[in-house]
Amino acid sequence: MEQSGRVFDGPPGRACTSTSAPAQACNNWVNSLHLRQLITYQPEGRFWPLQGAETGIYLVLATGLGALCTWQIRRRRA
């Protein structure tokens, strides 16, 4: 994010894309452009509830897709 509050959408520097460059080199590159990084973490206590919700969503989607496929196959046989 730029100092003005706009999101930086330029190409990343080589220090941030190279696998051999140390992490500090990327931080130095970001600081040289006067950019700031906004990182948001979820509290530790929300990990398992979020995992449960995600699992539930995927199970519902998988069940729905399986039911749709079964319905399509049975409909075509009739």
Image: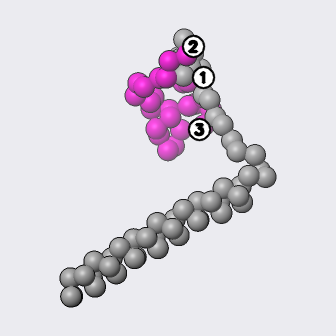
- Could you tell me which quadrant the N terminus lies in? top right
**Circle 2 sits on which residue?**
3
In primary-sequence order, the first of circles 3 and 1 is 3
- What residue is rendered at 28% in x and 85% in y? 74
Residue 24 appears at what percent x and percent y? 62, 32
* CB contact under 8 Å: marks 2 and 1: yes
Left or right: where 40 falls relative to 34? right
Residue denoted by label 1:
36
* Discs 3/2, front: 2
- Which sits earlier in the primary sequence, circle 2 or circle 1? 2
What separation in Å lies between label 3 and label 2 (alpha carbons)?
25 Å
Give the SS element for disc 2: loop
**Does the image show residue 32?**
no
Q: Is residue 61 left or right of residue 75?
A: right
Residue corresponding to mark 3: 22
In the image, taking residue 53 as reference, residue 67 lies left or right, namely: left
Badge nearest the viewer, 3 or 1: 1
Q: Amino acid at mark 3?
A: Pro
Which residue occupies the extreme front position in the image? 78
Q: Please state which of residues 1 and 16 is positioned toward the viewer in this rendering.
A: 1
Residue at the right extreme, as displayed: 45
Query: How many residues crowd mark 3 within 10 Å: few (<14), some (14–19), many (20+)?
Result: few
Front-most of 38 and 65?
65
In this picture, which residue range is highlighted in magenta?
5-30
Residue 47: x and y in percent read 71, 55
Q: Secondary structure at mark 3?
A: loop
* Residue in the picture at 47% in, 40% down: 18
Residue 71, relative to residue 59: is it above or below?
below
Question: Which residue type carries mark 1?
Answer: Arg
